[in-house]
Amino acid sequence: METVSINKITKKNFQVEESFKALRSNVIFSGSDIKVVGLTSCLPNEGKSSVSLNLAVTMAELGKRVIFIDGDLRKSVLLGRYRINKPIKGLTHYLSGLNTMDEIIYSANVDNLHLIFSGQVPPNPSELLDSYSFTRLISRLREEYDYVIIDTPPLGAVIDAAIIAKNCDGMALVIEANSISYKFAQKVKAQLEKTETKILGVILNKVDMTESGYYGKYYGKYYGD
């Protein structure tokens, strides 16, 4: 299995470290039946991708066997952010029948962590995610890993996250502090509820910790989506 360096979580301070440990604990204590966790947001650039990957890393650091899936088939940010210039076979290659599951899984430079990147941008992302191939993939990964963490597209922008949610045990909503209106957040929450997937909670991101004090630390102010 090929190893990919993701330059994991740089420049974390103590509060951010503790915040992700708290998030990890909250997911673990959600129940032993919560193994496949999806994260979405209302809009792009709320920090969802960074929170998702950091959650996966923090889980792996605890000794859990974790696989992170970049489920944003329309606009992945991970390959560019981590400067991965080599050819990558990803989720779209598997869902299109071009590659096997083993061929799209990469080992990260973090013990216990594996990765599935999004792959080439397809003309039909919703259809691929709503396929039996995706359901079968998640079912197989559920058997092989302690946790499957899926970064999904913003639900306030496209429907893909709701489709992915049908294969998840729980979903969490990442919201940028002082950016999303209450009404819009409620609308997105209602969309999640229609999937009948358990909503694990809301992660408030990009909080100004200088104003909110210790208990306003979730989850760091320098993450971008």
Image: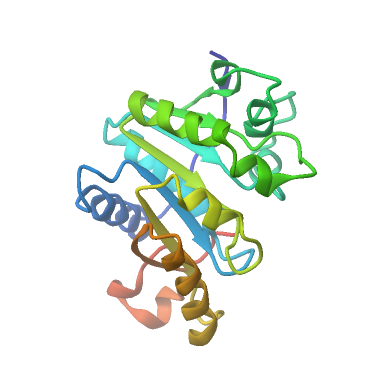
Residue drawn where x is 71% and y is 20% of the image: 98
Q: Residue at x 73, y 24 (%)?
A: 86
Residue 196: quadrant of the picture: bottom left
- Residue at image location 51% in from the left, 86% down from the top: 183
* 26 relative to 12 in the view: left or right: left
- Image position of 92 with respect to 31: above or below: above
- Residue nearest the observer in this picture, 208 or 204: 204
Does residue 11 appear anywhere in the picture? no
Residue 172's image quarter? Answer: bottom left
Decide: is 103 above or below 182.
above
Q: Residue at x 54, y 81 (%)?
A: 184
Residue 36 pos. (x, y %): 38, 42
Residue lying at the far top in this picture: please name it: 1
Q: Number of callouts in the render?
A: 0
- Percent of width and height locating residue 61: 32, 35
**Display coloring:** rainbow
Q: Can residue 14 be seen from the camera position used here? A: yes
Q: Residue furthest front?
A: 132
The x, y position of residue 40, in whole percent, is: 51, 59
Q: Which part of the image, by quadrant, shows the C terminus? A: bottom right
